[in-house]
Each structure stands twice: as C-alpha cells, then as structure tokens.
Image (cartoon, grey):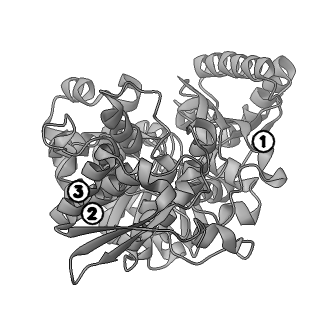
Amino acid sequence: MNAEITPDLPADLDASFGPFGRPLFNDPSVRKLSRVGVVDIGSNSVRMVIFDGAARSPNYFYNEKVMCALGAGISDTGRLNPKGRVRALAAIARFEAIAQSLGISPLTAVATAAVRDAEDGPEFCADVLRETGLQVHVIDGPEEARLSAQGVLLGWPGSYGLVCDIGGASMELAEIRDGRVGKCVTSSLGPLKLQSLKGGAKARKAYAKEVIKDLCEQMGEQKDRLFLVGGSWRAIARIDMHRRGYPLHVLHEYRMTPKSVRETVKYIQKSDIDELRAACDISSARMALVPIATEVLKILISRIKPKDIAISSYGIREGMLYEQMPQKLRDRDPLIEFARFSESKNARMPGFGTTLYDFIMPLFKSAPFATKRMVKAACLLHDVTWRAHPDFRAEVCFDNSTRANLGGLSHSERVFLGLALLHRYRNQRKGSQFEDLFGLLTDSQQREAEILGKAMRFGAMLWMEKDEKLGEIRWFPKKKQLELRLHLSAKPLFSEVAEARLSSLAASLNAETIVKFNKASKDS
C-alpha cells in the first residue's frame, strides 16, 4: 500500500486504542460538527453542501448545485450576469429554506471571484441578506486559495505540493507542506473571464503564459505533486479516464501525469465536443469551458513540471469545514475515523472490529504501517453491510469501499480494501463483476487482500462477545505453519464450517495448520 498517512501520532492518543488513538466522533469538541451546512457562491455555480457523520471524514448529507454563471460577461460589463443573479438568489433562498427545515440554519456562505470583482457585488450580497437573512462573506483571492488548500488537507492529511483551484473567474495557487498551508496567490485565469478575452486562442495563450509565469515566480519552485481543485479540472479528469479506459470512475485521488494530460488535451482538440460531453457525462455549461481550461492546464504543467498530478474532489467547501475543526481532529486519519463511525452506527457488534484486528494481526506483524492501516479499517468495516442479502454481500462490500466518499485512500487502496471485504464473505474472486478493477493491484497485493479477507472470515466465527478472548493465531512464515490456539470453552465454536475457513486461509498462505486446545484462563 502507498498511503501518505504516516504513523506520526497526535499527543492525545490513548494507548489502549493502539496506534490509531481513541475515537473522536463523539468527543464534545467534535460533535457540534456532525452536521454543518455551507454555501459556495462561485463564478460559475452556486452550491450548498450539508456535511454529516464523522467530521474528519464527512458524508454529504445534502449536496445541490445550480449553474448560475454569475461571472459570465463580467470582463466586458464589470457587473454580475443579470440572469445569473436571479438564478443565484432563488437558489440561495431555497438552500436557506432547506437548512431551516433541517434545523441547521444559519448556513455559512462565502462568495468568491465574481462577487468580489463585480461593481454590483455588494448590492447582490445586500439582496441575499434582505431576501434570505443569510450573511454572505466575500473572500479575497488568497483566502480562497487557503480554504481550497485546507479542503485538500481534509482528504490528504500531511500532504505536500501545490494546490491549484480553478473557478469560473479566477485561479488560485497555494502551497501545502507538513499539513499546513503556506504561500497563497491568485489570478484572473478563470475560463469565464478568458472566454471574453479579445484575440481568441492566441491571445488567451499569451495572456495565460504571462500570468502563470508571474504566479510561479511568486510561489517559487514547486516540483512536487500538483493537486487540482475545481469543476473544470474534474471534467478534464473524466475525459482522461474515458480516453484511457480507466476502470474506477472515482475522481477523488485520480492520478495523471504531465504526459497523460498533454495526450488528453490533444484528444479533446480532435474530438466532437458534444459526443465527448455525452460519453463523459459532463454538463453542457461545464463542457463549454473545458477547451479553455485545457489551454491553462497545459501551460501550468509545462511551467512547474510536477512529479505527478492528483484530482481533489475536496475544495473550498471542505476547507470551510476543516477551518472549524480542533487540531486534534485535523491530525486524525480520515479513513480510520470513518471506519469507526460506520462500525458504531451499522455493525451488529460495535467494538468487535478491534478484537478482530488484535486476533489477526500476527499475520501482518512485519507489515508496514500503511498495510496495518488497511487491516484496521477492514476489521472495523467487516460487518457494516450485514443487512445486504447474503448472495450479494460480497459485491456490496466491494462496491461501497471502492466508491465511497472517502479521503485518505488512493485508488489502489480502495480496491485493496474492497477486495479484502469481498473475501470476508467469499473465498473466490474469479467471476466477480469487479474483476476489471483488480488490475489496479499487483498480484502480491491481491494475495495480501485475500489473506486479510479470509482471516476476517475465519475470525468472525470465534467470538460471541466483542471483548471475549478465546484464542490466538500464531504465524511462522519461515516454517509455513499457521497455529491456532483455543481455550477449551471455544471448542464448540470451532465447527466444521470454521475449520473449513481456517483451511482456506492456510491455503492462501501456502501453509499447514496446527490446532491446539488448552485449559488456561480465557484472558491469559
């Protein structure tokens, strides 16, 4: 596994919970973030998101977007798009009414480039306040960059590199390193603004080169990862997936290289835009901006030469949530917090995941921390889909893991987690409808996921109470011996089915099994 989460542990960890610390989602300082509503009034769209669940890895309880194009024509008129103003005001009124009905009013609302640049921006904010009672906070470019970068940190704790957020009327850059936001700069390189630039593609290219040169000089050398935030970048990523025939259609953490971006730019230029839009499920309003956005992206990557490129679905809205988090929550692993929250809400025996983790860990004793992290998450999630029909439980587990709205997981880790949970309910993966995704893992990773899944499948049969310790596994990799030691009181649990599951696990390990019963105390 190649996660960027490192075992640098927060100071508030309780040793009894191991290297992942005490769950925080019920902590009083965190519980108030369990449902938070934000409104992002952008140059191209107005969106409301209501976050819910484990705040460190929130679920999207409600998510609605209206394409208003507030910034359309602003370069020519200096004012907001009149039709966009009407649509935006109606959308915000609807959002505030929904928030009131859910008991989470008032919403936190921010407006970005179009409203801050337009001469009638203050008038628009006054209209919103009068019509809805909602106070709109108009933020400047560097603050927009900072909040977007914090959104990236919500999904990638401890990440480093350059965040580039493109909106309709602006483009921001922010440096992140060691879990902190550094330098932030802003520009007017938004597709809606560039659309009306006189002189066509040639003039846009010259202008973009000049602006990006100035931005890069302000930021200094940035050759690490480039994180892309914004709807136009996500649309380009969808097209890149389509061109490559990439099997996992999850945008967050999707990786591209500078070479693949250049190839996708050429692919867009030679394609029929309407056919491409339909094939990639991109709105016509968004697709109209894609060719201009590709011109900017091509110049940007040519200038900074990043080592790789990652798409972030998290941006300014998630950054607003991150802003409200106490530091001890920011320091936590979003995957583990999500898994703990899911277990507490959905498992038949909340808390058993930790017992299962302790039981099977001898199989992964020498594994790197990134793998142990996957083992922990899988154990916590091993029973959360028990309500699904038994015939489909394995597929539901896999689909939920690979496509869930989660931060802190690369695409290969999503598939690893899904495959482990698939094997929790099924011995064989051959013939699965998800076989095309298995190729995102190496053969050794697939085998490791299989071992993890079969270990959970066996271990889940041996406990009736979450804290009861009836036995242990000992693994001798050099001897290829898998030893199971059980207390005599657990003998009735070691049935024919349990024995068959142990044998299946041993087969995946290419090992022989030894089963021993003893009369020692259960807790010894």
Residue wearing tag 3? 503
**Three-letter amino acid code at disc 3?**
Ser
- As measured in the structure, the alpha-carbon distance from the residue carrying label 3 to the one carrying label 2 is 16 Å
Residue wearing tag 1? 137
Residue wearing tag 2? 448
Residue 371: give x, y in percent of width and height: 39, 68
Depth order, front residue of 54/461: 461
Q: Do residues under tags 1 and 2 come within 8 Å of each other at their CB atoms?
A: no
**Mark 3, mark 2: which one is toward the viewer?**
3
Which residue is farthest bottom? 478
Look at the image and tell me whether residue 184 can be seen. yes
Q: Residues within 10 Å of mark 3 (few under 14, many from 20)?
A: some
Q: Which mark is residue 8?
A: none
Residue 169: give x, y in percent of width and height: 53, 42
Whether 113 is drawn above or below 120: the answer is below
Depth order, front residue of 177/32: 32
Q: For numbered disc 3, what is the local secondary structure? A: helix
